[in-house]
Image (tube, helix red, strand yellow):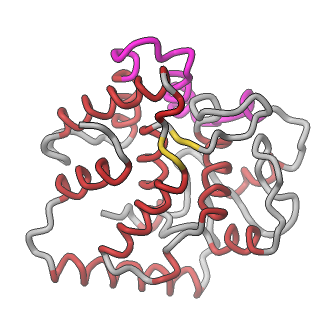
Amino acid sequence: MLQDDSQLFRFPGYTSGLASRFGCAARDPVSEFPLSPIDRKIDGLGAETSILSETNATDYVDALLGKFSLGEKQLPGLASLKDRLARAEFTAVRHPEKGIPESRLGQAFNEMMDEFRMPGWTRVSPEELHAFRAMTALALYPKSTPRLANGNLRPTCRPVEALYLIYLLHANMGVQPELREVVRAGRWPATDPRALPSQGPLQLGFLPRNSATARRLREYHAALNAFLTAHPGFNFQDEVEMLFDRLGIAR
């Protein structure tokens, strides 16, 4: 379920050198990011001004699935899940009040970690989740995340963003320890539009190779393998459908 170790802790198309690009607070993140052409295309399709119909929402979902080469072979029943997601995404664009609260997203991820009996350090607090979301949205999808008039993120996510964030949290084993420390120390910016702290070692999408990282990887893999061994009948499609239900994505 996890990516190859060489790809962990890296958002697609980003490297550790990206951190320096956030040093100038005067830059407009919406115009500067994403850096990857693939992510720029997906972000454009996900902009609220681009989703004028359910067909537009389907195009957005297809583009994101295509990025990860996810099809029916990898996830049987994907067609019905995709239709369900596209309908919910279009509804959330037309009716922002029907978005998924950050609190529900965090609860869904933590419940998934509980179910898999993952190490306690994988759980995320509301503050850590918001920081992770703000940083991820700035770098990967600045146009397609819902924002308030002042540029701050809305307290709710659209369904596609919610699922994408849970995938990234899983791939990163929760939030990076550096991000957790920044949040706990009160160094996280009070506003979201340029949400990377000006102090500390945090780097977007990159976690240094060290003994602590290796230990976390071993613990995470060991817990996941133990769960799969104890549940030989585990069905990924059922897990995805349960996640849809936990997030409140209508059938």
The question of residue 19 being in magenta is answered with: no
- The quadrant in which the N terminus is found is bottom left
Give the residue at x 69% y 67%. 179
Give the residue at x 49% y 29%. 42
Question: Seen in the image, is 124 located left or right of residue 180?
Answer: left
Percent across and percent down for residue 154 are: 64, 39
- Please tell me in which quadrant of the rendered image residue 153 appears: top right
Of residue 39 and residue 243, the one placed in the foreground of this image is 243
The question of residue 30 being in magenta is answered with: yes
- The quadrant in which the C terminus is found is top left
Q: Which residues are magenta?
A: 29-57
Q: Residue furthest top?
A: 52
Percent across and percent down for residue 231 are: 14, 76
Give the residue at x 41% y 25%. 91
Q: How many numbered markers are drawn?
A: 0
Percent across and percent down for residue 204 are: 67, 56
Q: Is residue 240 above or below residue 47?
A: below
Q: Is residue 194 above or below residue 106?
A: above
Of residue 218 and residue 193, the one placed in the foreground of this image is 193
Q: Is residue 102 above or below residue 2?
A: above
Task: Name the magenta segment's main secondary structure.
Answer: helix
Of residue 199 and residue 180, the one placed in the foreground of this image is 180
Q: Is residue 172 above or below residue 54?
A: below
Question: Seen in the image, is 127 located left or right of residue 87?
Answer: right
Of residue 73 and residue 224, the one placed in the foreground of this image is 224
Q: Residue furthest front?
A: 97
Give the residue at x 30% y 74%. 115
